[in-house]
Image (cartoon, rainbow, N blue to C red):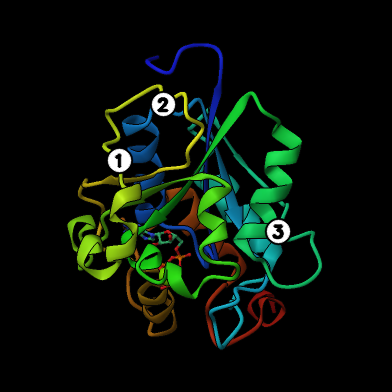
Amino acid sequence: MRSGGRSRRIGVLGGTLDPIHVGHVETARVATAALSLSSLVILPSRVPPHRQNGPSASPFHRFAMAALALSGLPYATVSDEELCTEGPSYTVLTLERFADRWGEGSQIFFITGADAFAEIETWYRYPAVLDLAHFAVVSRPGTPVRSLGERLPTLTSRFRDPRDRDDPSGRRWIYPIDAPTPDVSSTEIRRRLRDGESIQGMVPAEVELHIRRHGLYLETTTADHLQ
Ligand code: ATP
Ligand code: MG
């Protein structure tokens, strides 16, 4: 591993994950490879500050589906940090807690898709949030990372090539990662399930089984489904 043994390089991928899908898994995988991350934490959020409507599967089901999606990745874990913390899930507050807990020997890389990062100026405690972790920003179909320079001109000096290593300055960087990821969204998956359409290939097989078994994302409740 190129990162050497001295500092743990921990990737954190947050989101509503309602449900987790192959786009999330691939985004996490390409960031892990591009930045030689040593471990990966998937972080379902509690109350997404930018959303009008709450998620449509419970936090328990979202956590369970994330764990199922990652069962084949030995370096990955699912964190209940935001689900168990009162109030909205603000990334800046979570990153502060992680930095305290994991200590100086760790570097945190917060992984986002380019669509989410394009909205960074609206995040709680921007721009301070950018000083708490490195950001790994992965292209999403419709939002390539090369569009970000034009969208966020004040941040271009913070962009750094993911192949560059060992910056002793302690600066926090933004690493754009231009890799193809599947053109899938949770919104489209929820719509398909509501309309009785196939979601095959859009979520890992274990996740689809969980969704079907518990009747998630249908108009009826879980209890109705079991009648
Ligand atoms: P929704 O449609 O409900 O917004 P979503 O598919 O966008 O769901 P989120 O939970 O909002 O999923 O996304 C969590 C994180 O994963 C965000 O940073 C988002 O940009 C990123 N992401 C999701 N899908 C992809 C993808 N296909 N490629 C790259 N990044 C992705
Ligand atoms: Mg989204």
**For this rendering, which residue is in front, 200 or 41?**
41
Q: Secondary structure at mark 2?
A: loop
User: Can residue 141 be spotted in the picture?
Assistant: no
Query: Can you identify the residue that label 2 sits on?
Result: 167
Q: Quadrant of the C terminus?
A: bottom right
Asked whether disc 2 touches disc 3, contact meaning CB atoms under 8 Å apart, the reply is no
Q: Residues within 10 Å of mark 1 (few under 14, many from 20)?
A: some
**For this rendering, which residue is in front, 107 or 30?**
107
Q: Secondary structure at mark 1?
A: loop
- Would residue 103 be found to the left or right of residue 69 on screen? right
Q: Residue at x 57, y 72 (%)?
A: 215
Q: Secondary structure at mark 3?
A: loop
Query: Can you identify the residue that label 3 sits on?
Result: 82
Q: Residues within 10 Å of mark 3 (few under 14, many from 20)?
A: many
- Would residue 57 be found to the left or right of residue 109 on screen? right
Three-letter code for the amino acid on which mark 2 is drawn? Asp
The residues tagged by marks 1 and 2 sit, at their Cα atoms, a distance apart of: 11 Å
Q: Which mark is residue 59?
A: none
Q: Position of residue 112 (x, y in %)?
A: 42, 55
The picture quadrant for ligand 2 comes to bottom left
Asked whether disc 1 touches disc 2, contact meaning CB atoms under 8 Å apart, the reply is yes
**For this rendering, which residue is in front, 147 or 72?**
147
Give the quarter of the image for residue 85.
bottom right
Q: Is mark 3 within 8 Å of ligand 1?
A: no
